[in-house]
Amino acid sequence: SAVISQKPSRDICQRGTSLTIQCQVDSQVTMMFWYRQQPGQSLTLIATANQGSEATYESGFVIDKFPISRPNLTFSTLTVSNMSPEDSSIYLCSVASTTALDGYTFGSGTRLTVV
Amino acid sequence: AQKVTQAQTEISVVEKEDVTLDCVYETRDTTYYLFWYKQPPSGELVFLIRRNSFDEQNEISGRYSWNFQKSTSSFNFTITASQVVDSAVYFCALSVGSGYSTLTFGKGTMLLVSP
């Protein structure tokens, strides 16, 4: 299955600043997904990112707050902009992989704390 | 729209007890996949099983077993002879269609296994 390198693994940021999270995949994948997991909560899909097109955002998430780039088939970034303490969460990227037993592979997550 | 319900928020057992985690799903699609993931305190998602909607065979893998019943839209997960290392949050998830669409997660069940 695909292997994802997600960086940073954790960060503590000041409110009002932005953080960019990177996901690098060791193989070409069509679909990449970004999820947010607020403390003690389940995973919520932020957006789906396909290479060569703009990301598709779920209800409640907007591009100005969570801009996503997908410059090629192995890389994507998610930026959390103008952060507030409410943005403190784990952010995970995921890819759909036809070779993975489960069909999906997840990055190890970025644990973000906004102070 | 899809929905996954995990009614048990938290379960506490003593080591060696058997425990069943419940999952009920809703979808109008006839083709779909069901998943179970484990999230230990470290935060990464660990894939446990994927089951497609046309395969109602129960599955056993070591101490883990899964009971898929389309008649009740349930996909329950049983751990036999639980161990302390089983302590984690367990998520049930659903994706619809034959391709690789987005995952809809349940809210998760936190399992605490004490010695």
Image: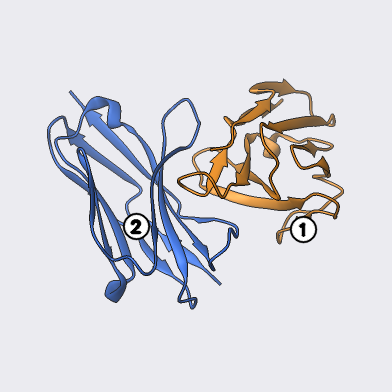
Seen in the image, is B74 located left or right of residue A74? left
Q: Is residue A72 above or below residue B113?
A: below
**Residue B55: horizontal and vertical position, in percent?**
32, 65
**Chain painted blue:** B
Secondary structure of the residue carrying numbered label 1: strand
Q: Is residue A80 above or below residue B42?
A: below
Closest to the observer, A39 or A102: A102
Location of residue B15 by image quarter: top left
Closest to the observer, A80 or B103: B103
- The amino acid at mark 1 is Thr
Residue under pointer 2: B7
Seen in the image, is A71 located left or right of residue A39? right
Q: Colour of chain A?
A: orange
**Residue A94: horizontal and vertical position, in percent?**
62, 43
**Residue B108: horizontal and vertical position, in percent?**
41, 48
Seen in the image, is A95 located left or right of residue A83? left
Report the chain holding disc 2. B
Report the chain holding disc 1. A
Picture mark count:
2
